[in-house]
Image: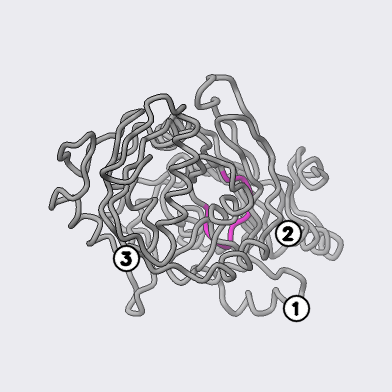
Amino acid sequence: MEREGGRSDGSASLANRDVKRRQYIRKMNGAGNNSVTHVVIGEEAQGQRLDNYLLRHCKGVPKSHVYRILRSGEVRVNSGRVDATYRLQLGDNVRIPPIRIAERPQNEVEEAAKARVDLPIIFEDDAMLVIDKPEGIAVHGGSGVSFGVIEALRRQRPQAKFLELAHRLDRETSGILLVGKKRLALTALHDMFREHGAGADKRYLVLVKGRWMNNTQHVKAPLLKYLTDSGERRVSVHAEGKASHTVFRLLARWPEMSLLEAQLKTGRTHQIRVHLAHLGFPILGDEKYGDFNLNKRLRPAGLKRMALHAWRMAFRHPLLGTPVECVAPLPDGIRSYITAVDAANSREFVADNLQHILEQQ
């Protein structure tokens, strides 16, 4: 990387160029940058669209401004104008004009990272890592949330060249979350999740209100996103919605509560939550679609969160093709509540694997 008008060093290794690129990004995130900068693309950005690359690295710049400098030709690749959808190639030289960025105070970023330093790693290799996400933390910042899992990871791993979410979990949901460490791995993971359940076997544990009777039940109810009058995102079952498919299996039943395994065949927003609420079995502690009066009674009784946990995921490694199976044990907040209910009530039904699930550590 060099300033415009300077001389590139043809003998510089790609690794050195990447170090300079990261140094540049840190400069961009300061008060401002009054000169044109050139960035040499490394493997971590190879294959990414130019507009997405700029949006990713020009944090704090309005999206409209990024697209304005793209349309005007101020951003160039290898000295030529390209479309915003251009896919970056290894070694491309990207010219970025002066951009002024408003950044959050550094101490705010540092404190937010420290607040969620405990992100248990279930699996990691050169291509990806799998996190057991705690409940109550968003997967990324935005929509009123200043910090999330991915920002914390980047803060905790400043040496990492590439860290991107492969999918999402609701803030209130805990459990398995995949993060790509290479662009090729991330692309393969995205393709896997788009295969409507064929690429990854994702299973959740969920506590619901009521006596669930069927051992196995397929729910195919289309889901439609909408905004409330206050601007909050919600989802409902609607004939014009997207096709959605969840398989529920009964693990245990008590007089007023049931424990289910939910297997996602599609990955729609709030899919499990809305399917269960639609059937009349709201998730315990769900503040969007649940039984609000019941939720108020649950907190003093020991359940202080939404009882939905991404428990198990089986899939093919995105680069090697080998089988991978990850398990995130049931969090103490849900496990202890189940134990208390079980001690105070007689079981109406129990699956053979319930004890194994409760004892997993």
Give the residues drawn in magenta, as a range: 169-177
Circle 3: element type: strand
Circle 2: element type: helix
In the rendered structure, which amino acid carries the disc numbered 1? Pro
The residue that disc 1 covers is 300
The residue that disc 2 covers is 334
Gap in angstroms between the C-alphas marked 3 and 2? 30 Å
Gap in angstroms between the C-alphas marked 1 and 2? 14 Å
Gap in angstroms between the C-alphas marked 3 and 1? 33 Å
Whichever of callouts 3 and 1 sits on the residue coming sooner in the sequence is: 3
In the rendered structure, which amino acid carries the disc numbered 3? Tyr
In the rendered structure, which amino acid carries the disc numbered 2? Ile
Whichever of callouts 1 and 2 sits on the residue coming sooner in the sequence is: 1
Task: Report if residue 175 lies within the magenta region.
Answer: yes
Q: Is residue 77 left or right of residue 203?
A: left
The residue that disc 3 covers is 226
Mark 3 Cα shell of 10 Å, populated few (<14), some (14-19), many (≥20): few
Q: Nearer the viewer, residue 329 or 119?
A: 119
Mark 1 Cα shell of 10 Å, populated few (<14), some (14-19), many (≥20): few
